[in-house]
Amino acid sequence: MGGFFQRQLAVYVEYHRDPRNTAMHVVGILLLFTGAVMPLTLVKVPLFGSEVSLAVILALPVLVYWLLLDVALGIGILAVSIVLFTVASTIAAQVSTVTMWAIFAALVALGLAAQAIGHKIFEGREASLFTFPSHLLLGPMFVMAKLFIALGFRRDLAAILAPLPTNSLSTR
């Protein structure tokens, strides 16, 4: 799926050229994921003799999809997901139900706000999600690809994700 992923990423990056927008996406994606899985971590489902949270069960197809798109980036996302599942589970288990839902609402609102600010203020255009709904699943891959490139890995993706030169004409 490497060629497919690179083509999808090339379209996605056109809506995410500004580094400040990318930073807002890092924050937004982490907040949204943590908030979204938090209430689901409280629901336990018996599976193969043990209990698994509904959050893990519902996230598995997406995690597998990311692994199929790009194994290395998928493993990176899987590692971050484990940390975020742990954070969400810990918070949900330590607070009252009302507090958990308040934290859920705050995380989701702040995550969406970060994304909106990144696009409106820094990128100067609508989020790609409205034109390409599949981009909802590409955001984490984009962020992980940026991290891998910053760490000196994945030169194959660096050309696709390179920022526009400051003197170039933009499509905005």
Image: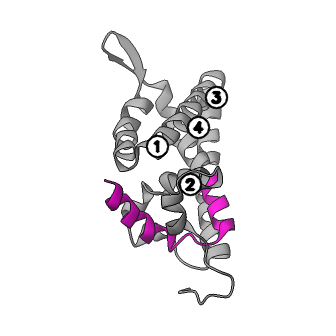
Read off the residue under disc 2: 143
Q: Position of residue 118 (x, y in %)?
A: 64, 67
Height in image: 17 above or below 43? Answer: below
Height in image: 7 above or below 45? Answer: below
Sequence order check, earlier mark of 3 and 4: 3
Q: Nearer the viewer, mark 4 or mark 1?
A: 1
- What amino acid type is highlighted by mark number 1? Ala
Task: Kindly state the secondary structure of the residue where label 2 is placed.
Answer: helix
Measuring 58% from the left and 27% from the top, which residue is drawn there? Answer: 86
Q: Nearer the viewer, residue 126 or 152?
A: 152
Query: What is the spatial separation of the Cα atoms under label 2 and label 3, in whole angstroms?
Result: 24 Å
Query: What is the spatial separation of the Cα atoms under label 4 and label 1, in whole angstroms?
Result: 34 Å
- What amino acid type is highlighted by mark number 2? Val
In this rendering, position of residue 63 left or right of residue 147: left
Please tell me in which quadrant of the rendered image residue 50 appears.
top left
Read off the residue under disc 1: 72
Q: Main secondary structure of the magenta part?
A: helix
Q: Residues within 10 Å of mark 2 (few under 14, many from 20)?
A: some
Read off the residue under disc 3: 91
Q: Are marks 4 and 1 in contact (CB under 8 Å)?
A: no
Query: What is the spatial separation of the Cα atoms under label 1 and label 2, in whole angstroms?
Result: 13 Å
Q: Nearer the viewer, mark 1 or mark 2?
A: 1
